[in-house]
Image (cartoon, rainbow, N blue to C red):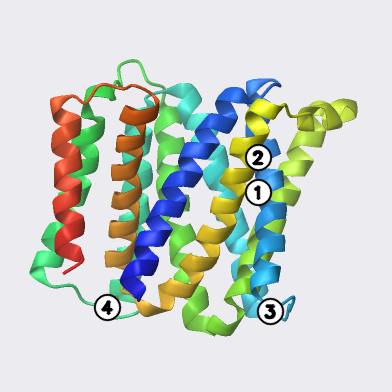
Amino acid sequence: MSTLLIILIILLYSLQTLFCKFYTDRYPGRPELASPVFCILESIAIVLGTLCFNGFRFSASWATVLIGVLNAAMLFGYNTSLIKASARGSYAFMNVMMLFGGILVPMLYSAIFLGETLSWYQLAAIGVMLVACVVMNLEDIKLKDTPLSYYLFCLLLFLCNGLYGTLLKLQSVQNDAQKSEMVMITFALMGVIALIQLVAKERGNTAAAFRLNRKCIVPLILCLISAALAINVLVFVIPMVNIAVFYTVENGGVLLLSGIYSILFFKEKLSLPKAAGMLLALVSITVLSM
């Protein structure tokens, strides 16, 4: 059952990424407003969706509140570093750092604090996935004349992406019965932070940022549905799996599907390095799924 749910998670997160790209491209306002508007609407969708999945119950201990607040900070740091890094340098290198953090930080946590061990072939497969990510992005990595601040934001992205996944696992260890409450706290706070940013930036013109046209509202709705489903399936699966293996498969699967989507929907050419990276990712996923 967990295998089918992991496949579903990969599909949902890859679709969230795809629909978010369509929404961003078609957003009618200033491009810099697309992200905070999305974060606010995503927080509403996930809080309401999770509340529904949880039977309209909410009972959180102080430990759950603390983990939720910390994870909201990780989401804020992730969104901020993603925007700041992409504006300063190579998007491809930033992608590599993001995936490395999403795999390596939870792996260290599971080894040090949970005592979870990996076989030699699992470690090799994780290494292959990291190589696959580098190979897929290698052609587009351009670091000449890149400012130091870019690398600092990439490092922050590495840590925030990894700690976000780690804190989800920590909640399942600390109190799995309150995982839905932790998700609601995390995304509610993220939405509040995004709203404060938007109001401070736009002041008296905040409502105008939410004037969406028909072209962007359909992919936005599909993206929000995918996001709400994905996080709720994710927190259900995490207690069942070794998180080092899970996050490698999940991140690699999304990377692989995103590469396929870019060819199908955005007419990107399949170069030899990208094809080799996709093949390596598929090999890694296959080995880790055995």
Q: CA distance from mark 4 to mark 3?
A: 27 Å
Dots 2 and 4: beta carbons under 8 Å?
no
Disc 2 crowd, CA 10 A, few/some/many (<14, 14-19, 20+): many
Disc 4 crowd, CA 10 A, few/some/many (<14, 14-19, 20+): some
Residue in the image at 36% along x and 51% along y: 101
- Left or right: residue 175 versus residue 58 is left
Q: Is residue 116 above or below residue 159?
A: below
Residue in the image at 49% along x and 78% along y: 172
Dots 1 and 4: beta carbons under 8 Å?
no
Q: CA distance from mark 2 to mark 4?
A: 36 Å
Q: What's the mark number on residue 116?
A: 4
Q: Which residue is mark 2?
A: 38
- Left or right: residue 115 versus residue 172 is left
Q: Earlier in the sequence, mark 2 or mark 4?
A: 2
Q: Earlier in the sequence, mark 4 or mark 3?
A: 3
- The kind of residue on which mark 3 rests is Trp
Q: Which residue is mark 3?
A: 62
Q: Residue furthest left?
A: 120
